[in-house]
Image (cartoon, rainbow, N blue to C red):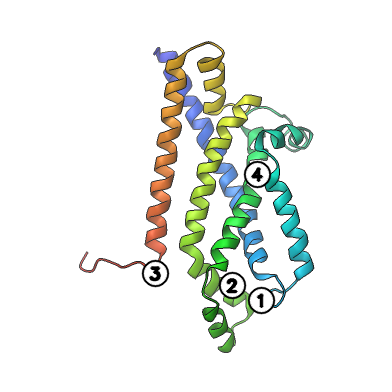
Amino acid sequence: MSSNLIALLYSATLQTLYMVAASAILGTIFGLPLGVYLATSQRGELLSSPWVNKILGLVVNAARSVPFIILVVAIIPFTRALVGTSIGTDAAIVPLTIAAIPFIARLVENAIREVDAGLIEAARAMGATPLQIIRKVLIREALPGITLGLTLAVVSLIGYSAMVGAVGGQGLGDLGIRYGYQRFMPDVMLAVVIILIVMVQLVQSIGEWIAARVDKRAPRNRGR
């Protein structure tokens, strides 16, 4: 493999990391509070608002049901209006973020719903407000599950970032298509696949390590 192709792989890897990191951060900023609200706004819950919950649930389900590659094409006018172009890494962040928000929201919702209801009742009995219960009980207890959920979301975004290369999104997916497929260079395709696998393994390992560290239920080795 020539030094020029190695430079292209390096540049494409940085582009992929940029797209994934930016969309993961933006997706978490919007998806985390949405997931918390979905988990606490059904009838009789802390922020009871069943109709709003139902409407938001339908919107989230609708967004999650659209295949990603179709979503990328469908929102091209919106992407162009937002960032001024429909190609490149900045443009790719828009559909990646839109895909991440409902996915993260559902993962956060599921993690919070696994918290023992007895803890909520105990906090209520001590006079805690709904926001205090959410912040000091639900999120803290659900933090390991939320961490693993965000890890899964980042892994999915890595795969999505490769797909967005098919429509001019740059990154490793674009490099694999242009050189590995269109120019019949299997060594480039293999390198792209290996880099993506390494990225996924690193993200998964880091996510599991963080989840174990924040899990208060996990046994700690004393004396270390």
Give the spatial CA distance, label 1 vs label 4: 28 Å
Image quadrant in which you'd find residue 83: top right
Give the spatial CA distance, label 3 vs label 1: 24 Å
Report x, y in % for residue 152: 51, 48
Q: What residue sits 55% from the left and 77% below the top?
A: 117
Q: Where, quadrant-wise, is the N terminus in this rendering?
A: top left
10 Å crowding of disc 4: few (<14), some (14-19), many (20+): many
Earlier residue among tags 1 and 2: 1
Q: Secondary structure at mark 1?
A: loop
CB contact under 8 Å: marks 1 and 2: yes
Q: Kindly identify the amino acid type of the residue bearing the numbered disc 2.
A: Ile
Which residue is identified by label 3? Answer: 216
Give the spatial CA distance, label 3 vs label 2: 17 Å
Image quadrant in which you'd find residue 167: top right
Q: Nearer the viewer, mark 4 or mark 2?
A: 4
Which residue is identified by label 2? Answer: 134
